[in-house]
Image: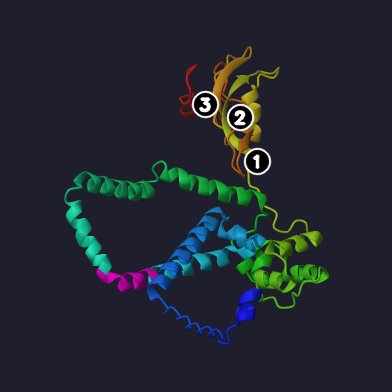
């Protein structure tokens, strides 16, 4: 002891330090239904918003299905399914969240209701804006109508880039129906598809099913057929054509007296007994114009029917020549002769 004090060596203690006490086990936090519904509500809202934006940019259904359109690996039907199901999930979780927080919600409404009595301007403005949005969407007023116009422009853009189907939703037609739409026989369609490696033995299979078996878009089915029949599904045009038709016309006529004293109308009457002599007068000496109906040929618009200007010979008896009873002339027929310049 004295030696230790002299040397300054530390005094060793025979007592050992007590061991540290074990830490108590951490308590696990219980599952929070309110927190779960809040997080699920937020997640479903985000997915619903994103899928809604995607559907705004998608092409029309007939184009999306015909060209097998996809975005981020999902086609239009799949994006629609995601949007609809997340919308249902959002509504259901919102109802559960409201039930779990009902007392808090009612208290909040009571508190805000009292304060709302002093916020009449704010309440009125909110009601007006809500009504304006609804009316603008219904009647397509700007800017709500502009939003929908942009949507149509986007869909038109996809449609211009895509190969057009013979008829809308051609992928739903059977091979027999599809062959009729592209104006080919079923045998021609089947042979063309088999030559291109498609399974087209069943004529009752749809175009979409045949394309799915090969893992291509339905538009590839028509492209394969057109390799052998380029005219398949070609649009048929219609238009107006020029045609030749018969037309009634009014023409200038003249009477000529030959050396034998027989006028031109008499010669014509010999070959056409039913021709009236009351068409145009003549003086028996020189050419005298007259008016009368005549048959003519003209160009016309249409199929088989045509209207045209006609050129015809007017015919009449020469009043300076005596009547010829052998030719069927009589005083009754003579009275039918019109004065010059009159129309029949």
Q: In whole angstroms, how far apart are the C-alphas of marks 1 and 2?
A: 20 Å
Q: Is residue 101 magenta?
A: yes
- The reply to whether callout 1 and callout 3 are in contact (CB within 8 Å) is no
Dot 3 falls on a residue whose secondary structure is: loop
Q: According to the image, label 1 marks what residue? A: 241
Label 2 neighbourhood size at 10 Å, few (<14), some (14-19), many (20+)?
some
Q: Is residue 207 magenta?
A: no
If you read the primary sequence from the N terminus, does the residue marked by circle 1 or circle 2 appear first? 1
Query: Which quarter shows the N terminus?
Result: bottom right
If you read the primary sequence from the N terminus, does the residue marked by circle 1 or circle 3 appear first? 1
Q: Which-is-in-front pick, marks 1 and 3?
A: 1
Q: According to the image, label 3 marks what residue? A: 278
Q: In the picture provided, is 275 more to the left or to the right than 339?
A: right
Task: Report x, y in % for residue 89.
Answer: 44, 70
Q: Residue at x 20, y 52 (%)?
A: 116
If you read the primary sequence from the N terminus, does the residue marked by circle 3 or circle 2 appear first? 3
Q: According to the image, label 2 marks what residue? A: 310
Could you say which is closer to the camera, residue 290 or residue 59? 59
């Amino acid at each position: 002891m004295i030696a230790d004090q002299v040397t300054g060596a530390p005094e060793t203690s025979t007592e050992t330090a007590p061991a540290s006490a074990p830490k108590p086990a951490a308590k696990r936090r219980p599952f929070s239904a309110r927190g779960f519904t809040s997080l699920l509500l937020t997640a479903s809202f985000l997915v619903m918003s994103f899928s809604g934006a995607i559907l705004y940019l998608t092409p029309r259904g007939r184009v999306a299905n015909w060209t097998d359109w996809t975005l981020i690996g999902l086609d239009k039907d799949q994006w629609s399914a995601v949007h609809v199901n997340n919308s249902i999930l959002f509504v259901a979780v919102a109802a559960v969240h409201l039930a779990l927080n009902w007392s808090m919600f009612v208290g909040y409404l009571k508190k805000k209701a009292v304060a709302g009595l002093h916020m009449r301007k704010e309440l009125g403005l909110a009601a007006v804006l809500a009504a304006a949005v609804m009316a603008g969407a219904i009647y397509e007023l700007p800017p709500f109508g502009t939003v929908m116009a942009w949507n149509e422009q986007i869909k038109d853009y996809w449609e211009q880039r895509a190969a057009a189907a013979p008829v809308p939703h051609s992928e739903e037609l059977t091979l027999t129906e599809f062959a009729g739409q592209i104006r080919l026989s079923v045998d021609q369609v089947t042979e063309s598809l088999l030559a291109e490696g498609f399974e087209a033995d069943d004529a009752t299979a749809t175009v979409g099913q045949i394309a799915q078996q090969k893992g291509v878009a339905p538009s590839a089915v028509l492209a394969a057929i057109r390799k052998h029949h380029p005219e398949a599904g070609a649009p048929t045009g219609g238009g107006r054509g020029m045609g030749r038709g018969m037309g009634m016309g009014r023409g200038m006529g003249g009477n000529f007296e030959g050396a034998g004293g027989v006028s031109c109308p008499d010669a014509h009457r010999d070959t056409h007994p039913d021709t009236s002599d009351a068409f145009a007068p003549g003086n028996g000496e020189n050419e005298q114009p007259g008016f009368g109906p005549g048959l003519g040929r003209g160009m016309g618009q249409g199929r088989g029917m045509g209207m045209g200007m006609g050129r015809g010979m007017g015919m009449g008896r020469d009043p300076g020549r005596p009547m010829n009873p052998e030719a069927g002339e009589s005083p009754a027929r003579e009275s039918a002769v019109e004065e010059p310049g009159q129309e029949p």
